[in-house]
Image (tube, grey):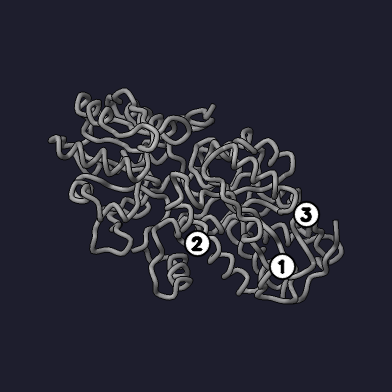
Amino acid sequence: MTMRRRSRAALALVAAGVLTLSACTQVTEEEPSAEPEGGGEEIVTGQGITEEACPDAVNADNGCIYLGVLSDLTEGPFAALAVPITDGQRAFWAKVNADGGIGGFDIDIDTYTRDTKYQPAEHAAQYQQIAGDILGIAQSLGTVNTESVLPDMIDRSLVTVPTSWWSGYAFEDYDQGIILETGYSYCTEAIVGLDWFAETYDAPTVVQAIGYPGDYGGDSAEGVARWAEANGATAATPIATGPNQVVGNQDAVVGAVLAAAPQVVVLAVGPAETAEIVGKLAASGFTGRFMGSLPTWNDALLGSAAAPALIGLYNHMTPYENWDGTSAGMEAIKESLGGELPANAGYIIGWVIGYPFQAALEAAAAAGDLTPEGLAAVVDGLEVDFEGMVPNHIYGGDAQANAAQSVNIGLPNPEVDLGLETIAAFYEGGTFAQTDYTSACVATG
């Protein structure tokens, strides 16, 4: 470990971060001061931090904090979404660096960005290559992929931002307080989304879940089942499917939905499967509607043969503000692009997942400990301001009380940038409060 003396400018930035966090957090006289001993002049550092400036540093006098990225960047099933996610992260940290960095350090995510091809074995192999050289992980794409290395992350105290939305991340007995999830879970999304549907259309008597097996489709299907039980509806048997490159097509899914005849189908698949399922069911005379989970949408679908069916029958759900939002965070995102559009809304996700890591770094710097252990120590109770992109969130504590449960409902619209028009912003229903959210909705193993 080394000790770095902070400049006055860095101290001012850290103090501003402490004020921001403390302004949103209840403080009692019994709580210890966030300032390090010795008058707040030094920060302990360890792995993942150098006294030398980052490559292509914005602030030549700053040291460098290195964060890892493990994502699907070339040939995996989510590369079309993950590449813009990573681009959004780069833009977020570029703004942090342009604003002076954190605690006398700039942040670098490029040096230790690795392509995992959305394969657990590759994810684990790439993780092992970088785990000893980084302070934390700014993006770990996929629940099963993240789980493949989670025990080692816990052993190393490597704070991690997952790019997936499994309900298990909300519970400290699972992640030991090193996971910084953003937004709601797939399970919560289905519950709240169906509340919106029931208020907007006739309350459904039969609801249907379709999804990939495991954390994604399984979590969403459990949310559908919980909503049905709480609201006196029937949850048809969930339909498990896979990506088209694995299962070939979705014809069996289409037949099963026609047999069940639900009024609403909740989708937890990829964009290609979404287009095929919605398009073929519409062509078969199906008159129900579709609620699509966050990963189901890509605005390229508006150029597909399924576009008319999607415009007429599909609504998208996301915890994050859509491109037509007006928050300070969305304004900053658009400014980062200089008036251009990103490849898709993955860029929004990449930007938003930067906020909790920034807040954790600021809190750890204020406490004088930017080691992995020092960073992990500030996660429990950390309150994060997302600049209006999602509601503020407190990490740790009671999962049900602190759960994110605001959904943005989008309608496909080719006249709107990135193809989604927000028709309900940060909607919250009443069913989630009636459910038992004391453990993961579904196990991943």
In which quadrant of the rendered image does the N terminus lie? Answer: bottom right
Helix, strand or loop at disc 3? loop
Q: Which residue is mark 3?
A: 47
Residue at the spot of label 1: 105
Residue 133 position (above or below residue 207): below
Residue 150 figure quarter:
top right
Location of the C terminus (image quadrant): top right
Using the rendered view, name the quadrant where residue 135 is placed. Answer: bottom right
Q: Nearer the viewer, residue 269 or 247?
A: 247
Q: Mark 3 belongs to which amino acid? A: Gln
Q: What mark, if any, has residue 315 been given in the picture?
A: none
Does residue 311 appear left or right of residue 366 in this picture? left
Residue 219 lies in quadrant: top left
Residue under label 2, please give it.
Answer: 88
Q: Position of residue 247 (x, y in %)?
A: 36, 31
Label 2 SS: helix
Q: Position of residue 154 (x, y in %)?
A: 70, 39
Q: Residue at x 66, y 72 (%)?
A: 56
C-alpha distance separating marks 3 and 1: 14 Å
